[in-house]
Amino acid sequence: MSNLSNITVIEHPNDKVALFIDGQAISERYEIHHEKAIIDELKHLEEGKALKLFEQFIFSHTDLNLEHSYLYSTCIVKQNQSYQIARNFIYRLTVSGQMPSEHVITNQGKAMSPEDIKKFIKDHVEMSLTKYTDLKYAY
């Protein structure tokens, strides 16, 4: 597996694999197993590109014909012939009848920490309840 430089692959009897980058599990909270095909995907990953491993829905809200969704994703990025984990807080806007558009939400260009994300969500829920929601009427 020399093509995978700093990734350790552990095979499991259920025909799945676990991946470790620089000896660290991708998810420390859950024991994650992937299909073996991920090895070929990583070998063919182009320099500077990312392979999305997981996407976790956090919350969404809608207004008129717009759906605003917030997600957390974990990707493997190939840089300088080695692999790194990238975790992103993502905003996805879906307009009725159109393909969704999305972008990564950052804190002044840096990845958001778990504390940043919690504050962002808390602030947006509070703003929604105070500015955009009338709890006496549904519009």
Image (tube, grey):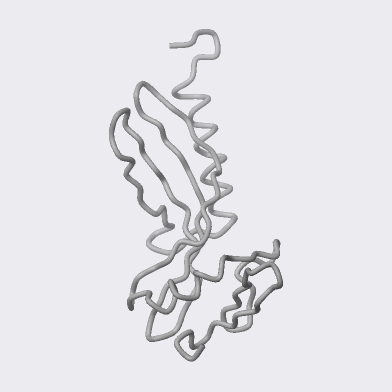
Which quadrant would residue 31 be assigned to in this image? bottom right
Q: How many marks?
A: 0
x and y percentages locating residue 94 in the rendered image = 35, 35
x and y percentages locating residue 132 in the rendered image = 44, 23
Q: Which residue lies furthest to the top in this view?
A: 137
x and y percentages locating residue 58 in the rendered image = 56, 43
Which quadrant would residue 116 be assigned to in this image? bottom right
- In the rendered structure, the answer to whether residue 39 lies left or right of residue 23 reads left
x and y percentages locating residue 35 in the rendered image = 56, 66
Above/below status of 56 relative to 135: below
Above/below status of 108 relative to 16: above
Name the residue nearer the viewer: 35 or 69: 35
- In the rendered structure, the answer to whether residue 2 lies left or right of residue 118 reads left
Name the residue nearer the viewer: 105 or 52: 52
Q: Residue furthest left?
A: 98
The residue at 49%/31% (across/down) is 127
Which quadrant would residue 62 be assigned to in this image? top left
Above/below status of 116 relative to 51: above
The residue at 48%/43% (across/down) is 70
Name the residue nearer the viewer: 56 or 37: 37
> Quick one: quadrant of the C terminus?
top left
Q: Which residue lies furthest to the bottom in this view?
A: 2
